[in-house]
């Protein structure tokens, strides 16, 4: 052999039909090369014939064999060429090779169009401290409550609604990086949605259109993430005619707020063509800006095919004391309720209706009572509730609401009559009748002049001014303590105006000193954390120490009270810090 050719490599070219590529294999003579050897490239798995040309048939064959088991269905191309015990491994090798080839052979598809740019938000960004605080509140919102005691740390999830309201009050916008967490929080808690979406602004709506999980944010918005201006007649008309139902509801509410007459005209233009369930929602929007100008439309709605629509129209008309329906109800009520001229002292006589005719049903009365209610008392309550309250002083000889409520009622009709007057006072937002029915806060609820229900008293309080509400509930707490006051506290404006805050603190201190069962006040303590003015923390510091437990006090009550007051103080201080972080520097505006 020629020495010059002993070390020369020879090239052998082979074609791999499965890989559709050409492989060049170097072969050398026995004489080792003088240069360092290159590490060998691992050979691909042996061709199986199952995935020629990357066909879907070959892949389906592999999948079927894997699902049924190689014992029951050996893959074609492997049977006979691989030992039976090696068939499962060979199948996986073939599947891996086939997968790589399919992925490597993919052709890039056309690029999806880029989303439209996020709209600008002209509002001022959050101060840095407030931005960090929002991140903290959002991160803690889903933290599970610890078992047993809550501990002395503030409940950040309960403070998030207040933080959002305060930030919106100052006109800030959320940082872009915070928007996903903010939308997630709004998705999880419906009570956060109005304030969270307001803080998120147009960029939050833009982002919500890119994630199906946030589609709730688009309900009640225009197709482009916003509503046309009520003054844009062409845009309003186009959205009203072509928009989705939620968009139309939001549009009607916006127009109604800006121009009640224009909102009514918009609704009337398509009323007859709307579905019954849609008519009900649209009609409910007329509560905003309700006035005598709506009476004609509402009277026509009394003849609607839908019972729910008729009932809503009647309710709205009864809130207009000068409406024709209110007059009809007053006439019917006059035949049922009046002074008993034969009694030795002025007494209210009641004769409940004996039937509920078609005219009464057209005016909104429901003929069939709920289970457990008599028909006549059911009809009477609806009549009195819908009658205009200014009618009654005339009916009772010029007496004031307080004097009318104080009159005795014959034949055990007092509870039914006073309850109907309570509902009428709330519906018609009449503070004079509310005061009369509430009576003195010192009188126990069970013997009050107008109602024995704390829920009804809470509704009556909602018709009074913020200051009057706070004074009444403070007097109630001072007279009866906190055990009866929870519902009443819930209707008072936040933060609680004085003297309500002081009355609540005094009542909690009395309960603490008396060794009362502490867990029964957990609801009031939770309200106090959210509703007391932050400045009250200084007054509460002396209550954070563990009190001496009396012999008859509940076990562990002292520790609980100390812990609860510590949490209350720390929460109030945190609320003060939140307020300071969100307050713009003096002389600047967000």
Image (tube, rainbow, N blue to C red):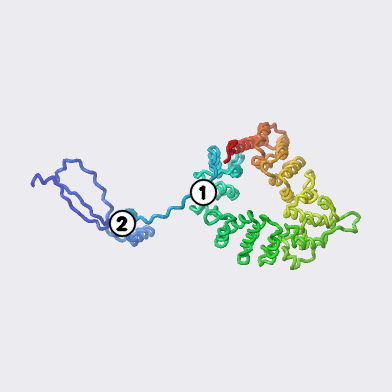
| Residue 556: % across, % down | 66, 36
Locate residue 315 relative to residue 25 in the image: left or right: right
Q: In the rendered image, which quarter contains the C terminus? A: top right
Residue farthest to the left, as pictured:
2
Image: 299 above or below 563: below
| Residue 60: % across, % down | 36, 61
Label 2: few (<14), some or many (≥20) within 10 Å? some
Residue at x 14%, y 45% (from the top left corner): 30
Locate residue 101 relative to residue 32 in the image: left or right: right
- Mark 1 lies on a secondary structure that is helix
First-in-chain label (2 vs 1) = 2
Which picture quadrant has residue 259? bottom right
Q: Label 2 belongs to which residue?
A: 84
Which picture quadrant has residue 420? bottom right
Image: 254 above or below 135: below
Q: Nearer the viewer, residue 510 or 165?
A: 165
Locate residue 137 relative to residue 331 in the image: left or right: left
| Residue 513: % across, % down | 72, 34
| Residue 546: % across, % down | 66, 32
Q: Label 1 belongs to which residue?
A: 203
Label 2–label 1 contact, CB within 8 A: no
* Closer to the eye: label 2 or 1: 1
Q: Nearer the viewer, residue 264 or 378?
A: 264
Disc number placed over residue 347 in the picture, else none? none
- Mark 2 lies on a secondary structure that is helix
Q: Nearer the viewer, residue 213 or 172?
A: 172
Q: Nearer the viewer, residue 270 or 326?
A: 270
Label 1: few (<14), some or many (≥20) within 10 Å? many
Q: Is residue 92 visible?
A: no
Q: Is residue 392 visible?
A: yes
Q: How far is mark 2 from mark 1, CA to CA?
A: 62 Å
């Amino acid at each position: 052999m020629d020495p010059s050719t002993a070390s020369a490599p020879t090239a052998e070219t082979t074609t791999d039909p499965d890989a559709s590529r050409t492989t060049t294999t170097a072969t050398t003579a026995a004489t080792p090369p003088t240069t360092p050897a290159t590490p060998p490239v691992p050979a691909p798995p042996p061709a199986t014939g199952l995935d020629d040309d990357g066909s879907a048939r070959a892949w389906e064959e592999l999948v079927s064999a894997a699902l049924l088991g190689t014992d029951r269905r050996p893959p074609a191309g492997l049977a006979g060429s691989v030992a039976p015990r090696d068939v499962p491994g060979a199948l996986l090798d073939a599947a891996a090779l086939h997968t790589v080839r399919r992925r490597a052979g993919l052709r890039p598809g056309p690029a999806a169009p880029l989303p439209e740019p996020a709209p600008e938000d002209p509002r001022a960004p959050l101060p840095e401290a407030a931005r960090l605080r929002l991140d903290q509140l959002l991160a803690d919102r889903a933290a599970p409550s610890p078992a047993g005691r809550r501990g002395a740390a503030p409940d950040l999830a309960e403070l998030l609604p207040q933080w959002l309201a305060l930030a919106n009050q100052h006109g800030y916008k959320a940082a872009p990086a915070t928007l996903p967490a903010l939308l997630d929080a709004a998705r999880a808690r419906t009570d956060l949605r109005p304030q969270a979406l307001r803080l998120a602004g147009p960029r939050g709506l833009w982002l919500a259109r890119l994630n199906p999980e946030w589609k709730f944010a688009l309900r009640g918005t225009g197709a482009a993430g916003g509503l046309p201006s009520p003054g844009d007649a062409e845009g309003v008309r186009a959205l009203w005619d072509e928009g989705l139902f939620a968009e139309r509801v939001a549009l009607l509410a916006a127009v109604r707020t800006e121009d009640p007459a224009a909102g009514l005209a918009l609704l009337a233009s398509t009323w007859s063509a709307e579905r019954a369930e849609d008519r009900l929602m649209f009609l409910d929007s007329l509560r905003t800006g309700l006035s005598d100008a709506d009476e004609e439309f509402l009277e026509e709605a009394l003849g609607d095919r839908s019972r729910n629509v008729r009932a809503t129209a009647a309710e709205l008309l009864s809130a207009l004391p000068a409406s024709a329906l209110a007059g009809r109800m007053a006439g019917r009520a006059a035949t049922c309720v009046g002074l008993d001229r034969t009694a030795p002292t002025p007494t209210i006589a009641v004769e409940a209706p004996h039937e509920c005719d078609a005219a009464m049903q057209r005016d909104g009365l429901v003929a069939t009572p709920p289970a457990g209610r008599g028909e006549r008392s059911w009809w009477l309550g609806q009549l009195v509730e819908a009658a205009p309250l200014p009618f009654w002083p005339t009916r009772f000889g010029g007496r004031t609401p307080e004097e009318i409520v104080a009159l005795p009622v014959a034949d055990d009709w007092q509870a039914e009559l006073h309850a109907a007057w309570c509902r009428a006072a709330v519906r018609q937002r009449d503070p004079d009748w509310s005061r009369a029915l509430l009576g003195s806060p010192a009188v126990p609820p069970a013997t009050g002049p107008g109602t024995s229900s704390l829920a009804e008293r809470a509704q009556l309080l909602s018709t009074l001014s913020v200051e009057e509400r706070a004074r009444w509930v403070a007097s109630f707490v001072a007279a009866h303590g906190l055990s009866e006051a929870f519902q009443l506290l819930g209707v008072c404006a936040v933060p609680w105006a004085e003297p309500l805050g002081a009355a609540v603190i005094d009542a909690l201190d009395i309960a603490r000193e008396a060794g009362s069962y502490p867990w029964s006040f957990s609801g009031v303590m939770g309200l106090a954390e959210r509703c007391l003015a932050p400045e009250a923390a200084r007054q509460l510091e002396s209550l954070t120490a563990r009190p001496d437990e009396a012999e008859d006090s509940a076990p562990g009550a002292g520790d609980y009270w100390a812990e609860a007051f510590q949490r209350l103080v720390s929460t109030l201080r945190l609320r003060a810090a939140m307020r300071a972080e969100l307050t713009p520097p003096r002389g600047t505006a967000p």
